[in-house]
Every structure is written in C-alpha cells, then in structure tokens.
Image (cartoon, rainbow, N blue to C red):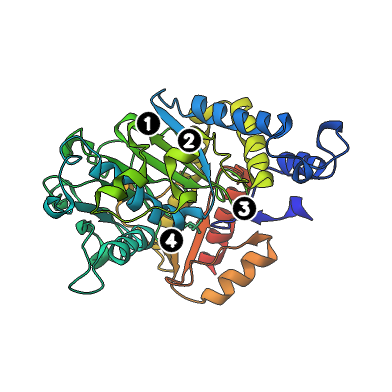
Amino acid sequence: ERSQVHNFAAGPSPLPTSVLEEAARGLVNYQGTGMGICELSHRGKEFKGIISGAEADIHSLLSVPDNYSILFSQGGGTSMFSSIILNLLAAHRLSSSNISLPASSYTPPNIDYIITGSWSSKAYSEAVRLCSPSSTSSPTYAIPHIAANTKPTGYTTLPSKEEYKFSSNPAYIYYCENETINGVQYSLSDEFSFPFDMIPSHIPIVADYSSSFLSRPIPHLNKHAVIFAGAQKNLGPAGVTVLIVRNDLLVDTSLAYSKGGVIPTPIGMEWKIMAENGSLYNTPPVFAIYVCALVLKELVRNGGMEKMKEINEEKAKRVYQVLDKVETIEKMKGVVREKKARSWMNVTFEIIEREEDFFKGAEERGLRQLKGHRSVGGGRASLYNAVGLESVDKLCEWILEFSRV
Ligand code: PMP
C-alpha cells in the first residue's frame, strides 16, 4: 500500500500521489480528448499549453530574469556534462576578443572545475575526455583545470575560501550545488556558500542543480550563466533535463566550428537551436514534461520556493539532530561533519554496527530505499520535496530505536 511506504530514494524518487493520479488519468484520456497525452502531437495545442505552462511556472517560482531561456532537453545530467563544454567553448570562440583570430593563433582556454563529490568529478572527467588531444598531432580544445578538490576529505566537506585556485581567465567555472552521493551542499549564506565574490562578473558560472532544483530559492541565480537539473529528484520522471541559460550564451556552434579551435556540437545538443524552437526542435519526452508540469503547478499552489525552503530545512534539521544525538553512543553518525556543508536533500550516514539489521528493521517499518550509493555504502536518506514530515519523523524514530538496542 503506497500510503504505508516512506520512500527515501535518491532518484528516481517519490512524486506527489495527487500528481501521479492525475498523470495516470491523462495517460489514458487527456482532458476529455479521448486520447492519452503520449498519443497527442507534441506540436498540438494541448502539449504546447503544457510545455509553455511548465516554463512559465519555473520562471515565476525561481524568479528567472528575462535575459535567460528555460529549455527542456534530453539525455540527463550526464549529457549536460558534455553539452556545457561544447556550447560554452563555442561561445568563448565567438566572444568579441576571439572571433577574428585565425585558428592557428587562437589559444585554448582553461575551463575550471570545482570538485566536491562524485558528480562534479564525473563532469570534470568528461571535460578531460572531450578536450584533451588523443595524439600529439590533434588539437587541444581547452585545458581542464581543477580549481578546488575535496577528494582528500572523502568529499565530506566543501572547500574553504582560501582553497579555491581559479585560473586567471577561464572560459567558464563549473560547480555542483548539491552532491547527491556524498551529501554535501553549498549553504545559502556565510561559510560554505558559493564564492561568487571571488569570480569576475564576465566569467560564466555553471551549476549542476540536479538534486536540489526547486527545493529552495536559488541564491544569486542572476550571477550564473547556466543552471541545469535532471528532473528525477524534485521535479518529475527521468527523461527530461531543465536548462536555464543566459541568452548571450546561445550561439551558433557551427559558426564557431568553422573558425577552428573548437569541437563540433551534435545538433540535438545545440542550445541556440533548442531555444529558437521552444525546446521542440525534435520530439521531446512528452510524458515526462507533462508530469513535471503537474508537479510545478502543485508547487505554485502550495506557496512556492519560500514555503518549500521552510519545510525542507525543517526536515533536514530533524534528521541531522537525531544523527548527532546517536553519534555520542557510537551506533550511527552523519558522514558530513561541517554543519554548514550538509545537504538538505541527501543525508548520508554511517551505521557503525549491525548495518544489515538497520536496513532490515527499516524495511519492516516501511522505510524504503535508504541504502547509500553503491560507490560509498552506508545509508542515505533523500528528503526531496515529495517526502513528508511524517516520513521524516518515522525515520528519526527508527534511528533512535535502533541506536538504543
Ligand atoms: N548530477 C547530479 C548532482 C546527480 O545527482 C546526477 C544523477 N543522480 C547526475 C548529475 C547525472 O544525471 P543523469 O543520471 O540524469 O545523467
């Protein structure tokens, strides 16, 4: 029975029951058309209404300024790792100081990555893979540079301000706002907030918001060039990725390629083409976008980002408080030691003794999908928007009960 299950999955993750029920109806018969949403043309008025509604809701929920485009793409966060490199290197090549240079005198720029966990590490690896020469005769497109790296801590904290070593003029700076596997997240203010003040305003800043998108307001959205998020955490089913991109970075990548010095961009990954076609250059994942649109409507109805922030802060606070409490009796403990670097969305913890018993007891109580990512082990409770306070309280009760035996 769905109502007896508390689902803490890291993604795909729970969605509001009311949304799923409406989506189930729309899958069979969309608003009395006698046809399901997956059977209607993506260019028909029904779907156009859905996608433009979703875009408008993201625009208002996050107060996205008018000089940004909101795009729906496919291929997940992983494809974004690649398309960021391709589109932003093309934009850099076409920037006013580089456009007239012949390929032979164009210098490949640095691209800066801040590595704070598994996902930013993967994004960096893709930069190395795409940009590095395969032989001495092939070109270098860009030089990936690690601006900070918390791997030596096991990704259990974030860099301090002194630890950032940015290049002098990188084509962009990349970071991951919330590391889903490791449970670290940039804080909204003070210590461990993102160091915007260290970065000159002309350098594009790129953020992976996959696992925290729409869980609270985005601080300094207007200081970013690109923000992206796979849908499958707070927003909807896997299969669609939201991209918020500043309009000056929507460039003709074929033109950049014709000038030399950059990598060709596959057509389905060119942001300019996506934007010019309202995310309908090719057939989009209609069902996934439909469910996202329903979730967004509910978010707007429920009070938007300030309300979500209040609830999500409370949920995280309750779980960390319990973990800090049981730590003293050495049964379980939170993995992330610095309080300001702790994720509100993915609480990672260690079960010091009898780990299997912890998970078995959790299952018996309807607490599901609590295992940590296979690469790190331990436990992880993901507290996305659709996870209610009552589920959080059930989890806290079990942690306390388990630790006392
Ligand atoms: N970035 C983050 C922060 C993620 O959590 C994930 C997936 N969990 C990805 C990127 C990769 O996304 P995808 O699986 O959609 O390619």
For the residue labelled by badge 3, is the local secondary structure a helix, a strand or a loop? helix
Q: Residues at badges 1 and 2 in contact (C-beta under 8 Å)? A: yes
Q: Nearer the viewer, mark 3 or mark 4?
A: 4
Say which label, 1 or 4, has the lower sequence index: 4
Near-viewer residue (321 or 92): 92
Question: Which residue is denoted by mark 2 in the rendering?
Answer: 275
- CB of mark 4 near ligand 1 (< 8 Å): yes
For marks 1 and 2 on the same chain, the one whose residue lies earlier in the sequence:
1
Instruction: Please report whichever mark, 3 or 4, sits nearer to the chain's N-terminal start.
Output: 4
Q: Is residue 322 visible?
A: no
Q: Seen in the image, is 223 located left or right of residue 161?
A: right
**Tag 1's secondary structure?**
helix
Describe the element under mark 2 as helix, strand or loop. Answer: helix
Query: Which residue is the site of mark 1?
Result: 247
Tell me where residue 256 appears, x and y as whole percent.
30, 46
| Residue neighbourhood size for the residue with mark 4, other residues' Cα within 10 Å, grouped as few (<14), some (14–19), many (≥20) | many
Nearer to us of marks 1 and 4 is 1
Q: Earlier in the sequence, mark 2 or mark 4?
A: 4
- Residue 397: where, in percent of width, then height? 58, 55
Q: Nearer the viewer, mark 1 or mark 3?
A: 1
Task: List the residue tagged with mark 4.
Answer: 181
**Residue beneath the point at 42% across and 22% down:** 66
Look at mark 3 in the image and give the residue it sits on: 394
| Nearest to the observer: residue 105 or residue 312 | 105
Q: In the rendered structure, which amino acid carries the disc numbered 2? A: Ala
**Depicted 381 relative to depicted 17: above or below:** below
Q: Tell me the CA gap for discs 3 and 4.
A: 22 Å
**What is the C-alpha distance between the residues marked 1 and 2?**
9 Å
Instruction: Please identify the quarter of the rendering in which residue 16 is found.
Output: top right
Please name the residue shown 46% across and 69% down the image. 378
For badge 4, the amino acid type reads Ile
